[in-house]
Image: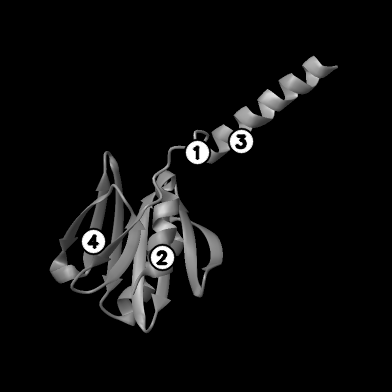
Amino acid sequence: MDKNYSIIGILVIMGLIVAISGCTSSGTNTQIQQFNGKQMSFQYLQGWNIQEYNSGYSVTLLKGSEQIGVTKKYTKHGYQTYLNDAASTYTSLGKFTEGNITYNKYDAGSDYAYALTKNGKYFTVYGPKIAESNMLEIIKTIN
């Protein structure tokens, strides 16, 4: 009986050591970086390279073969045109809320497309489904 308690005690101690050390983490990098561009700012997950185009109205995040596009639309008309095109090209997944932001989400095959307004500005975010957590971080913090 004492031997069983010793084994259980050792297993409990080993479990605590693993839990405290973080050895069971999934290995995903969740450190946040800030992008402050000419036309927009947002937070994104560390490890992505950023390129700014079109006087700051378009930003591309690159990580290996993955690419996320973030665009600030010039006008409400341009934004509405994007929504109409997305609705006819992609499968609408509906409206979602992330924090205080409501956005439209579309299934574009291996990618997701998002469209949102914030503070009177119009934005679209597009990228691979595997990068969804990074796109949602951008959506929550874009300005």
Q: Is residue 120 above or below residue 104?
A: below
Quadrant occupied by the N terminus: top right
| Residue 131 locus on image (x, y percent) | 40, 48
Residue at the spot 72% in from the left edge and 19% down from the top edge: 7
In the image shown, does 70 or 106 lie closer to the viewer?
70
The Cα atoms of the two marked residues, 1 and 4, are separated by 34 Å
Return the disc, 2 or 4, that comes first in the chain's sequence.
Answer: 4
- Residue 59 vs 77, above or below: the answer is above
What is the x, y in percent for residue 70?
Answer: 30, 62
Mark 3 and mark 1: span between their CA atoms? 10 Å
Residue 52 relative to residue 89: left or right: left
Which of the two discs, 2 and 1, sits closer to the camera? Answer: 1
Mark with earlier residue (2, 1): 1
Q: Residue 59 in the image: x percent, y percent?
A: 23, 61
Residue type highlighted by circle 3: Leu
Residue on which disc 4 sits: 59
Q: Indicate whether 2 appears above or below 35.
A: above
Q: Amino acid at mark 2?
A: Ile
Which residue is drawn at the image coordinates 74% and 24% (left, top)? 8
| Circle 1 residue | 22
Check disc 3 and report the residue beneath it: 16
Circle 2 crowding by C-alpha within 10 Å: few under 14, some 14–19, many from 20: many
- Report which quarter residue 40 is drawn in: bottom left
Residue for badge 2: 139
Give the side of residue 109 with respect to residue 74, left or right: right
Report how far apart the C-alphas of labels 3 and 2 lie in the structure: 37 Å
Tag 4 secondary structure:
strand
Report crowding for label 4: few under 14, some 14 to 19, many 20 or more residues within 10 A (C-alpha): many
Direction right: furthest residue: 1
